Image (cartoon, helix red, strand yellow):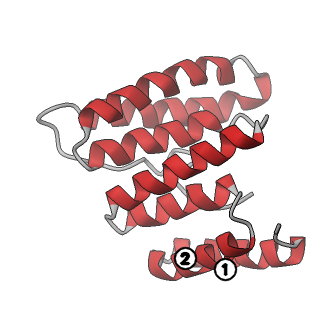
Amino acid sequence: MKVSEPTFLLLKSRLKMRRQNGDYSSALRYLDEYLIEDPQSWIGHLSRGHCNFGLGKHHEAVKDFLTALDVEKEMNNEAHVRPEILVNLAAAYAASDSLDEARKYCEQAEQDLKTLEAHPSQQERSRRLRATLDEVRVFHSPGRPARGPSSRSSSSSPDPR
């Protein structure tokens, strides 16, 4: 069952307020409510991953990002969201010390970003995602401290569109 537009907008508003206040736990409750109504929402799962990442639950974030990726594949989404999911997935794997998986998703994100960069309307978003991907590569190299997705990434804020 798909969430109605007014319900979606209300949840989006609440989620944004909670996220801005760093209240990831409350944001997760809203996302759980949203995903009960619309379990096939890739943005809901992506946002859940952001919240779990913000809470330091990197393994949970990985699960959420993988679900977002699966849902996005099923929907054959043409919004060019795959690179966004892949960048976040790489960051979550790296933060959970799964560097081989992080590298794998960095490589996939790199390929998808090349396609995204070819679209003139996606230039700014591509630039932000590339900067975040570069951060993931630098800060999640062996021997470097773990860091999450930068706030420069369009995907680092769990804000359903």
Element on which disc 1 rests: helix
Quadrant where the image shows the N terminus? bottom right
Q: Amino acid at mark 2?
A: Ala
Front position in the image: 154 or 107? 107
Q: For the C terminus, which image quadrant?
A: bottom right
What is the number of callouts on the image? 2
Tell me the residue at 68%/27% (across/down). 123
Q: Residue at x 61, y 30 (%)?
A: 126
Residue 61 percent location from the top left of the image: 42, 57
Q: Residues within 10 Å of mark 1 (few under 14, many from 20)?
A: some
Q: Is residue 50 above or below residue 95?
A: below
Name the kind of residue labelled 1 in the image: Arg
Residue, disc 1: 14
Q: Locate residue 129 relative to residue 76 in the image: left or right.
A: left
Q: Quadrant of residue 105?
A: top left
| Residue 159 image label | none
Q: Are marks 1 and 2 in contact (CB under 8 Å)?
A: yes
Q: CA distance from mark 1 to mark 2?
A: 7 Å
Percent across and percent down for residue 35 are 66, 70
Disc 2 is placed on an element classified as helix
* Position above or below: 17 against 153: below
Q: Which residue in the protein does label 2 denote?
A: 27
Pick whichever of labels 1 and 2 is earlier in the sequence. 1
Question: Residue reaching furthest left?
Answer: 143
Please tell me in which quadrant of the rendered image residue 119 appears.
Answer: top right
Q: Residue sitting at 40 percent across and 38 percent down?
A: 90
Q: Closer to the camera, 146 or 93? A: 93
Nearer to me, 161 or 60: 60
> Would you say 158 lies left or right of 42 here?
left
Check the image and report above or below for 111 versus 89.
Answer: above
